[in-house]
């Protein structure tokens, strides 16, 4: 009788606002996410600096 090997899957460390976020690809090649795209975009807008718009912020300071 063959023994079943249980693999321990370590979850990646994520920001506390993204706890439970999961991305999978189904058999049709479609991306499925546990959060809606608007919530992800809001998080990125608040936490990540856009390099393309960096020069606009510098102009506002002057």
Image: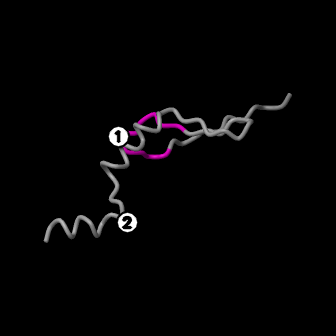
The reply to whether callout 1 and callout 2 are in contact (CB within 8 Å) is no
Examine the image and state in which quarter residue 49 appears: bottom left
Q: Residue 60 carries which label?
A: none
Q: How would you classify the magenta stretch by its main secondary structure?
A: loop
Question: Which residue is drawn at the image coordinates 47% and 38% (left, top)?
Answer: 37
Local crowd size for mark 2, using a 10 Å CA cut-off: few (<14), some (14–19), many (≥20): few
Residue marked by disc 2: 52
Q: Residue 16 carries which label?
A: 1
Say if the magenta span includes residue 8: no
Please state if 8 lies on the left or on the right of 57 as rendered.
Answer: right
- Point out residue 57 in the picture as x, y percentages from the top left corner: 23, 64
- Point out residue 30 in the picture as x, y percentages from the top left corner: 66, 38
SS under mark 2: helix
Report the magenta residues as a range: 12-22
Image label count: 2
Q: Give the quadrant of the N terminus.
A: top right
Question: Which residue is drawn at the image coordinates 56% and 39% (left, top)?
Answer: 23
């Amino acid at each position: 009788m063959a023994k079943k090997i249980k693999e321990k899957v370590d979850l990646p460390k994520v920001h506390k606002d993204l706890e439970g976020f999961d991305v999978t690809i189904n058999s049709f090649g479609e991306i499925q996410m546990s959060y809606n795209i608007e919530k992800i975009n809001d998080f990125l807008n608040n936490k990540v600096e856009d390099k393309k718009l960096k020069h606009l912020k510098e102009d506002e300071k002057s």
